[in-house]
Amino acid sequence: MRLFDFLVPLWLLGIVFPPTLESDFADVLHFGSLVWLPCVALLMGRDQFLIGPVLRKRMSMLFWTAATLVTITGSALVSADPLRSLGYVAASGVGLICCAGLWQIVKTHVFDWLSTYAMLGSALVVYLYFTGPRIQGRLSMSATSHANYLGLVAFGFLMCALVVRSRFLAALLIVTNFVVIIAAQSRGPLIAAVLGLLVYGTLKLTCVTKGNTAFAAVSACLVCVVVLLIYQDAVENWVSSLLFLHDKYRGIGTGFTRRLDAWQEALDLFKANPMFGVGFRMHEQYMTTLSSAHNGYLSLLADVGLVGAISPFVLTALSAWRLLRLSLDGNEIAILGFSFVVGYLFLATFERFLLGMGNPTSIVAWLFLFMPDGSRTVTSPGIRSCIHWKTMDVPV
Protein backbone atom coordinates (compact mmCIF):
# COMPACT_ATOMS: atom_id res chain seq x y z
CA MET A 1 0.00 0.00 0.00
CA ARG A 2 1.80 3.08 -1.26
CA LEU A 3 0.23 5.33 1.40
CA PHE A 4 2.65 3.85 3.91
CA ASP A 5 5.60 4.96 1.77
CA PHE A 6 4.81 8.40 3.19
CA LEU A 7 3.40 7.44 6.57
CA VAL A 8 6.45 5.43 7.66
CA PRO A 9 8.98 8.28 7.12
CA LEU A 10 6.63 10.70 8.91
CA TRP A 11 6.25 8.20 11.74
CA LEU A 12 10.02 7.90 12.14
CA LEU A 13 10.54 11.67 12.01
CA GLY A 14 7.83 12.16 14.61
CA ILE A 15 9.73 9.89 17.00
CA VAL A 16 12.76 12.20 16.74
CA PHE A 17 11.19 15.02 18.76
CA PRO A 18 9.77 13.73 22.10
CA PRO A 19 13.23 13.00 23.61
CA THR A 20 14.25 16.61 22.90
CA LEU A 21 11.35 18.09 24.88
CA GLU A 22 11.64 19.29 28.46
CA SER A 23 8.25 18.08 29.63
CA ASP A 24 6.77 15.86 32.32
CA PHE A 25 4.74 14.27 29.53
CA ALA A 26 7.70 13.50 27.25
CA ASP A 27 7.31 9.74 27.81
CA VAL A 28 3.59 9.92 27.03
CA LEU A 29 4.28 11.93 23.86
CA HIS A 30 6.92 9.41 22.86
CA PHE A 31 4.52 6.50 23.31
CA GLY A 32 1.86 8.34 21.30
CA SER A 33 4.29 9.05 18.47
CA LEU A 34 5.25 5.38 18.46
CA VAL A 35 1.81 3.78 18.60
CA TRP A 36 -0.19 5.77 16.02
CA LEU A 37 1.20 3.93 12.99
CA PRO A 38 0.24 0.41 14.14
CA CYS A 39 -3.20 1.80 15.05
CA VAL A 40 -3.61 3.12 11.50
CA ALA A 41 -2.42 -0.21 10.08
CA LEU A 42 -4.94 -2.16 12.16
CA LEU A 43 -7.79 0.23 11.31
CA MET A 44 -7.02 -0.32 7.62
CA GLY A 45 -7.47 -4.05 8.09
CA ARG A 46 -3.82 -5.03 8.13
CA ASP A 47 -4.33 -7.63 10.85
CA GLN A 48 -1.21 -9.58 9.81
CA PHE A 49 0.76 -6.53 10.93
CA LEU A 50 0.68 -7.93 14.50
CA ILE A 51 2.90 -10.87 13.56
CA GLY A 52 5.30 -9.91 10.80
CA PRO A 53 6.39 -12.15 7.92
CA VAL A 54 9.69 -13.22 9.47
CA LEU A 55 7.97 -14.17 12.75
CA ARG A 56 5.41 -16.29 10.88
CA LYS A 57 8.05 -18.00 8.78
CA ARG A 58 10.79 -18.54 11.36
CA MET A 59 9.68 -20.00 14.67
CA SER A 60 13.09 -19.35 16.22
CA MET A 61 12.67 -15.61 15.64
CA LEU A 62 9.14 -15.71 17.08
CA PHE A 63 10.35 -17.65 20.12
CA TRP A 64 13.24 -15.31 20.96
CA THR A 65 11.10 -12.22 20.37
CA ALA A 66 8.41 -13.55 22.69
CA ALA A 67 11.06 -14.61 25.22
CA THR A 68 12.53 -11.11 25.13
CA LEU A 69 9.20 -9.46 25.90
CA VAL A 70 8.35 -11.98 28.64
CA THR A 71 11.70 -11.75 30.43
CA ILE A 72 11.97 -7.95 30.38
CA THR A 73 8.38 -7.80 31.64
CA GLY A 74 9.38 -10.03 34.54
CA SER A 75 12.29 -7.74 35.31
CA ALA A 76 9.98 -4.72 35.27
CA LEU A 77 7.60 -6.36 37.74
CA VAL A 78 10.32 -6.82 40.37
CA SER A 79 11.75 -3.31 39.94
CA ALA A 80 11.38 -0.45 42.42
CA ASP A 81 8.97 1.33 40.03
CA PRO A 82 7.02 -1.38 38.16
CA LEU A 83 4.55 0.93 36.41
CA ARG A 84 7.25 3.13 34.91
CA SER A 85 9.35 0.15 33.86
CA LEU A 86 6.32 -1.60 32.36
CA GLY A 87 5.65 1.53 30.33
CA TYR A 88 9.11 1.23 28.78
CA VAL A 89 8.47 -2.47 28.16
CA ALA A 90 5.22 -1.60 26.38
CA ALA A 91 7.01 0.94 24.17
CA SER A 92 9.70 -1.58 23.26
CA GLY A 93 7.08 -4.25 22.57
CA VAL A 94 5.14 -1.93 20.24
CA GLY A 95 8.41 -1.01 18.53
CA LEU A 96 9.41 -4.64 17.93
CA ILE A 97 5.95 -5.51 16.61
CA CYS A 98 6.13 -2.53 14.23
CA CYS A 99 9.61 -3.44 13.02
CA ALA A 100 8.49 -6.95 12.09
CA GLY A 101 5.01 -6.03 10.87
CA LEU A 102 6.00 -3.13 8.63
CA TRP A 103 7.42 -5.60 6.12
CA GLN A 104 3.87 -6.84 5.62
CA ILE A 105 2.90 -3.34 4.47
CA VAL A 106 5.90 -1.84 2.68
CA LYS A 107 6.82 -5.04 0.83
CA THR A 108 9.16 -4.17 -2.06
CA HIS A 109 8.71 -0.40 -1.58
CA VAL A 110 11.26 -0.22 1.20
CA PHE A 111 13.72 1.75 -0.96
CA ASP A 112 11.09 4.43 -1.53
CA TRP A 113 10.31 5.19 2.10
CA LEU A 114 13.95 4.90 3.15
CA SER A 115 14.81 7.50 0.50
CA THR A 116 12.01 9.78 1.68
CA TYR A 117 13.13 9.39 5.29
CA ALA A 118 16.74 10.20 4.36
CA MET A 119 15.76 13.33 2.42
CA LEU A 120 13.31 14.68 5.00
CA GLY A 121 15.69 13.91 7.85
CA SER A 122 18.61 15.55 6.09
CA ALA A 123 16.50 18.66 5.49
CA LEU A 124 15.78 18.72 9.23
CA VAL A 125 19.45 18.53 10.25
CA VAL A 126 20.40 21.21 7.70
CA TYR A 127 17.82 23.48 9.33
CA LEU A 128 19.26 22.65 12.74
CA TYR A 129 22.80 23.29 11.49
CA PHE A 130 21.92 26.93 10.83
CA THR A 131 19.37 27.55 13.59
CA GLY A 132 19.96 24.92 16.27
CA PRO A 133 21.47 25.68 19.69
CA ARG A 134 25.15 25.09 20.38
CA ILE A 135 25.95 23.89 23.88
CA GLN A 136 29.63 24.28 24.78
CA GLY A 137 30.33 24.62 21.07
CA ARG A 138 28.45 21.44 20.12
CA LEU A 139 25.45 21.53 17.82
CA SER A 140 22.36 20.06 19.50
CA MET A 141 18.80 19.37 18.48
CA SER A 142 17.41 21.36 21.41
CA ALA A 143 18.63 23.19 24.49
CA THR A 144 17.67 20.21 26.67
CA SER A 145 18.94 17.31 24.54
CA HIS A 146 22.49 15.99 24.32
CA ALA A 147 24.52 16.65 21.18
CA ASN A 148 25.10 12.91 20.79
CA TYR A 149 21.37 12.44 20.19
CA LEU A 150 21.64 14.61 17.08
CA GLY A 151 24.63 12.54 15.99
CA LEU A 152 22.62 9.35 16.49
CA VAL A 153 19.70 10.43 14.29
CA ALA A 154 22.06 11.94 11.67
CA PHE A 155 23.82 8.56 11.46
CA GLY A 156 20.47 7.00 10.52
CA PHE A 157 19.78 9.64 7.85
CA LEU A 158 23.29 9.19 6.44
CA MET A 159 23.05 5.43 6.05
CA CYS A 160 19.53 5.52 4.57
CA ALA A 161 20.76 8.05 1.98
CA LEU A 162 22.61 5.18 0.28
CA VAL A 163 19.38 4.10 -1.44
CA VAL A 164 18.46 7.51 -2.88
CA ARG A 165 18.04 7.09 -6.65
CA SER A 166 20.23 10.02 -7.69
CA ARG A 167 23.87 9.26 -6.91
CA PHE A 168 24.68 12.95 -6.75
CA LEU A 169 21.87 13.62 -4.29
CA ALA A 170 22.83 10.56 -2.25
CA ALA A 171 26.43 11.76 -2.01
CA LEU A 172 25.24 15.25 -1.05
CA LEU A 173 23.02 13.87 1.73
CA ILE A 174 25.84 11.69 3.06
CA VAL A 175 28.29 14.62 3.17
CA THR A 176 25.63 16.85 4.76
CA ASN A 177 25.02 14.42 7.60
CA PHE A 178 28.76 13.95 8.11
CA VAL A 179 29.07 17.73 8.50
CA VAL A 180 26.24 17.77 11.05
CA ILE A 181 27.77 14.89 13.04
CA ILE A 182 31.11 16.71 13.11
CA ALA A 183 29.36 19.93 14.18
CA ALA A 184 27.78 17.96 17.03
CA GLN A 185 31.27 16.66 17.90
CA SER A 186 29.66 13.25 18.20
CA ARG A 187 32.48 10.75 17.93
CA GLY A 188 30.53 7.50 18.23
CA PRO A 189 28.14 8.23 15.34
CA LEU A 190 31.05 9.51 13.25
CA ILE A 191 33.01 6.27 13.60
CA ALA A 192 29.81 4.22 13.24
CA ALA A 193 29.02 6.00 9.94
CA VAL A 194 32.51 5.37 8.57
CA LEU A 195 32.32 1.73 9.68
CA GLY A 196 28.87 1.31 8.13
CA LEU A 197 30.00 2.78 4.81
CA LEU A 198 33.10 0.54 4.78
CA VAL A 199 30.99 -2.57 5.42
CA TYR A 200 28.53 -1.45 2.75
CA GLY A 201 31.30 -0.94 0.19
CA THR A 202 32.91 -4.28 1.05
CA LEU A 203 29.66 -6.19 0.69
CA LYS A 204 28.88 -4.45 -2.58
CA LEU A 205 32.25 -5.53 -3.94
CA THR A 206 31.33 -9.15 -3.31
CA CYS A 207 28.57 -8.75 -5.95
CA VAL A 208 30.91 -7.36 -8.62
CA THR A 209 31.50 -9.86 -11.38
CA LYS A 210 33.67 -7.81 -13.69
CA GLY A 211 37.33 -8.40 -12.93
CA ASN A 212 38.43 -4.94 -14.01
CA THR A 213 36.02 -3.28 -11.59
CA ALA A 214 37.25 -5.40 -8.71
CA PHE A 215 40.85 -4.76 -9.74
CA ALA A 216 40.18 -1.01 -9.80
CA ALA A 217 38.68 -1.15 -6.31
CA VAL A 218 41.65 -3.12 -4.93
CA SER A 219 44.06 -0.73 -6.61
CA ALA A 220 42.25 2.26 -5.08
CA CYS A 221 42.55 0.66 -1.63
CA LEU A 222 46.27 0.10 -2.13
CA VAL A 223 46.74 3.72 -3.19
CA CYS A 224 44.90 4.87 -0.05
CA VAL A 225 47.15 2.70 2.12
CA VAL A 226 50.29 4.13 0.49
CA VAL A 227 49.03 7.71 0.95
CA LEU A 228 48.23 7.00 4.61
CA LEU A 229 51.73 5.63 5.17
CA ILE A 230 53.35 8.64 3.53
CA TYR A 231 51.26 11.18 5.43
CA GLN A 232 50.97 9.16 8.64
CA ASP A 233 51.76 12.02 11.02
CA ALA A 234 49.34 14.41 9.34
CA VAL A 235 46.60 11.78 9.35
CA GLU A 236 47.19 10.99 13.04
CA ASN A 237 46.98 14.67 13.97
CA TRP A 238 43.81 15.10 11.94
CA VAL A 239 42.13 12.03 13.50
CA SER A 240 43.20 13.11 17.00
CA SER A 241 41.76 16.57 16.43
CA LEU A 242 38.54 15.25 14.89
CA LEU A 243 37.90 12.78 17.74
CA PHE A 244 39.19 15.06 20.53
CA LEU A 245 41.53 12.31 21.72
CA HIS A 246 43.75 14.72 23.63
CA ASP A 247 41.08 17.16 24.77
CA LYS A 248 41.42 17.80 28.52
CA TYR A 249 37.64 17.57 28.96
CA ARG A 250 36.72 14.75 26.53
CA GLY A 251 39.96 12.98 25.63
CA ILE A 252 41.53 9.67 26.57
CA GLY A 253 42.79 11.07 29.86
CA THR A 254 39.19 11.68 31.01
CA GLY A 255 38.17 8.06 30.49
CA PHE A 256 36.24 9.19 27.40
CA THR A 257 34.17 11.75 29.30
CA ARG A 258 33.90 9.46 32.35
CA ARG A 259 32.33 6.67 30.31
CA LEU A 260 34.72 4.13 31.85
CA ASP A 261 33.45 5.07 35.32
CA ALA A 262 29.84 4.78 34.10
CA TRP A 263 30.56 1.35 32.60
CA GLN A 264 32.03 0.18 35.89
CA GLU A 265 29.01 1.50 37.81
CA ALA A 266 26.62 -0.33 35.46
CA LEU A 267 28.67 -3.49 35.86
CA ASP A 268 28.48 -3.13 39.64
CA LEU A 269 24.69 -2.79 39.38
CA PHE A 270 24.59 -6.00 37.37
CA LYS A 271 26.79 -7.82 39.89
CA ALA A 272 24.47 -6.69 42.70
CA ASN A 273 21.38 -7.85 40.77
CA PRO A 274 22.67 -10.61 38.46
CA MET A 275 19.43 -12.48 37.73
CA PHE A 276 16.68 -9.89 37.11
CA GLY A 277 18.53 -6.55 37.24
CA VAL A 278 17.01 -3.37 38.60
CA GLY A 279 14.16 -3.17 36.09
CA PHE A 280 13.95 -2.46 32.37
CA ARG A 281 15.26 1.05 31.61
CA MET A 282 15.62 1.70 35.35
CA HIS A 283 19.41 1.61 35.79
CA GLU A 284 19.50 5.35 35.05
CA GLN A 285 17.78 5.97 38.39
CA TYR A 286 20.81 4.50 40.18
CA MET A 287 23.62 6.15 38.20
CA THR A 288 25.78 8.74 39.95
CA THR A 289 28.66 9.28 37.51
CA LEU A 290 26.64 10.00 34.34
CA SER A 291 22.97 10.04 33.40
CA SER A 292 23.21 6.50 32.01
CA ALA A 293 25.71 3.69 31.50
CA HIS A 294 26.49 4.95 27.96
CA ASN A 295 26.73 1.33 26.83
CA GLY A 296 23.76 -0.55 25.43
CA TYR A 297 25.04 -3.97 26.43
CA LEU A 298 25.94 -3.07 30.01
CA SER A 299 22.74 -1.05 30.32
CA LEU A 300 20.67 -4.09 29.39
CA LEU A 301 22.56 -6.30 31.83
CA ALA A 302 22.10 -3.79 34.64
CA ASP A 303 18.41 -3.34 33.74
CA VAL A 304 17.25 -6.93 33.32
CA GLY A 305 20.10 -9.18 34.49
CA LEU A 306 21.07 -12.45 32.87
CA VAL A 307 17.50 -13.77 32.71
CA GLY A 308 16.33 -10.77 30.73
CA ALA A 309 19.46 -10.11 28.66
CA ILE A 310 20.03 -13.57 27.16
CA SER A 311 16.95 -13.44 24.90
CA PRO A 312 17.57 -10.01 23.29
CA PHE A 313 21.27 -10.80 22.87
CA VAL A 314 20.45 -14.10 21.13
CA LEU A 315 17.72 -12.41 19.05
CA THR A 316 20.16 -9.71 17.93
CA ALA A 317 22.93 -12.19 17.07
CA LEU A 318 20.55 -14.55 15.25
CA SER A 319 18.99 -11.73 13.24
CA ALA A 320 22.35 -10.14 12.37
CA TRP A 321 23.74 -13.49 11.19
CA ARG A 322 20.67 -14.08 9.00
CA LEU A 323 21.01 -10.54 7.62
CA LEU A 324 24.67 -11.19 6.76
CA ARG A 325 23.77 -14.37 4.89
CA LEU A 326 21.16 -12.49 2.87
CA SER A 327 23.77 -9.81 2.16
CA LEU A 328 26.25 -12.35 0.84
CA ASP A 329 23.51 -13.66 -1.46
CA GLY A 330 23.40 -10.22 -3.10
CA ASN A 331 20.24 -8.82 -1.50
CA GLU A 332 20.80 -5.06 -1.60
CA ILE A 333 18.30 -4.27 1.14
CA ALA A 334 20.14 -6.76 3.34
CA ILE A 335 23.49 -5.21 2.37
CA LEU A 336 22.28 -1.80 3.51
CA GLY A 337 20.62 -3.37 6.55
CA PHE A 338 23.67 -5.28 7.71
CA SER A 339 25.89 -2.22 7.21
CA PHE A 340 23.40 -0.13 9.20
CA VAL A 341 23.25 -2.74 11.98
CA VAL A 342 27.04 -3.05 12.22
CA GLY A 343 27.35 0.71 12.70
CA TYR A 344 24.47 0.71 15.18
CA LEU A 345 25.89 -2.16 17.25
CA PHE A 346 29.24 -0.37 17.39
CA LEU A 347 27.48 2.81 18.49
CA ALA A 348 25.72 0.83 21.24
CA THR A 349 29.14 0.39 22.85
CA PHE A 350 29.15 4.10 23.70
CA GLU A 351 25.44 4.88 24.07
CA ARG A 352 22.66 3.17 26.03
CA PHE A 353 20.54 2.54 22.92
CA LEU A 354 20.14 -1.13 22.01
CA LEU A 355 16.67 -2.55 22.67
CA GLY A 356 14.86 0.71 23.47
CA MET A 357 12.65 2.34 20.83
CA GLY A 358 13.16 5.94 21.91
CA ASN A 359 14.73 7.09 18.66
CA PRO A 360 14.21 6.38 14.92
CA THR A 361 17.72 5.02 14.39
CA SER A 362 17.08 2.15 16.81
CA ILE A 363 13.78 1.43 15.07
CA VAL A 364 15.38 1.31 11.61
CA ALA A 365 18.12 -0.99 12.94
CA TRP A 366 15.55 -3.41 14.36
CA LEU A 367 13.46 -3.14 11.23
CA PHE A 368 16.44 -4.42 9.26
CA LEU A 369 17.03 -7.15 11.85
CA PHE A 370 13.44 -8.35 11.27
CA MET A 371 13.78 -8.30 7.48
CA PRO A 372 12.11 -11.34 5.82
CA ASP A 373 14.12 -13.86 3.84
CA GLY A 374 14.76 -13.13 0.16
CA SER A 375 13.70 -15.14 -2.84
CA ARG A 376 12.85 -13.06 -5.92
CA THR A 377 15.27 -11.09 -8.08
CA VAL A 378 14.42 -7.57 -9.27
CA THR A 379 16.32 -4.48 -10.31
CA SER A 380 17.53 -2.15 -7.60
CA PRO A 381 16.66 1.57 -7.93
CA GLY A 382 19.41 2.83 -5.66
CA ILE A 383 23.17 3.28 -5.79
CA ARG A 384 24.39 -0.09 -7.03
CA SER A 385 27.42 -2.03 -8.12
CA CYS A 386 25.29 -5.16 -8.62
CA ILE A 387 22.73 -5.31 -11.42
CA HIS A 388 20.21 -7.39 -9.46
CA TRP A 389 19.25 -8.01 -5.89
CA LYS A 390 17.01 -10.51 -4.12
CA THR A 391 14.08 -8.95 -2.38
CA MET A 392 12.10 -10.24 0.55
CA ASP A 393 9.53 -12.99 0.28
CA VAL A 394 6.44 -11.21 1.60
CA PRO A 395 2.89 -12.35 0.82
CA VAL A 396 1.10 -9.86 -1.41
Image (cartoon, grey):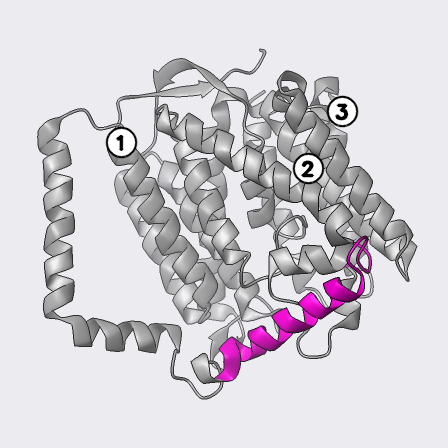
- Residue 112 forms part of the magenta stretch: no
Q: Is residue 194 visible to us here?
A: yes
Q: Nearer the viewer, residue 343 or 158?
A: 343
- Residue 278 forms part of the magenta stretch: yes
Point out the stretch of residues depicted in magenta.
Answer: 254-281
Q: Which residue is mark 2?
A: 96
Q: Main secondary structure of the magenta part?
A: helix
From this view, report whether residue 277 is shown above or below residue 23. Answer: above
Q: Quadrant of the C terminus?
A: top right
| Left or right of 172 in this view: 295 | right
Graded by Cα atoms within 10 Å as few (under 14), some (14 to 19) or many (20 or more), the crowding at tag 2 reads: many
N-terminal label among 1 and 2: 2
Image point 29% across, 48% down: which residue?
171
Using the numbered discs, state the Cα–Cα distance from disc 1 to disc 2 in whole angstroms.
Answer: 31 Å
| Amino acid type at mark 2 | Leu
Image depth: mark 1 or mark 3 in front = 1
Image point 65% across, 63% down: which residue?
20
Image point 44% across, 67% down: which residue?
187
Graded by Cα atoms within 10 Å as few (under 14), some (14 to 19) or many (20 or more), the crowding at tag 3 reads: few
Query: How far from the left and from the top, in percent, is residue 272?
Result: 79, 66
* Label 1: element kind: loop
Using the numbered discs, state the Cα–Cα distance from disc 1 to disc 3 in whole angstroms.
Answer: 40 Å
Query: How far from the left and from the top, in percent, is residue 59?
Result: 67, 21
Query: How far from the left and from the top, in percent, is residue 148?
Result: 53, 66
Q: Which residue is mark 3?
A: 42
| Amino acid type at mark 3 | Leu
Using the numbered discs, state the Cα–Cα distance from disc 2 to disc 3 in whole angstroms.
Answer: 16 Å
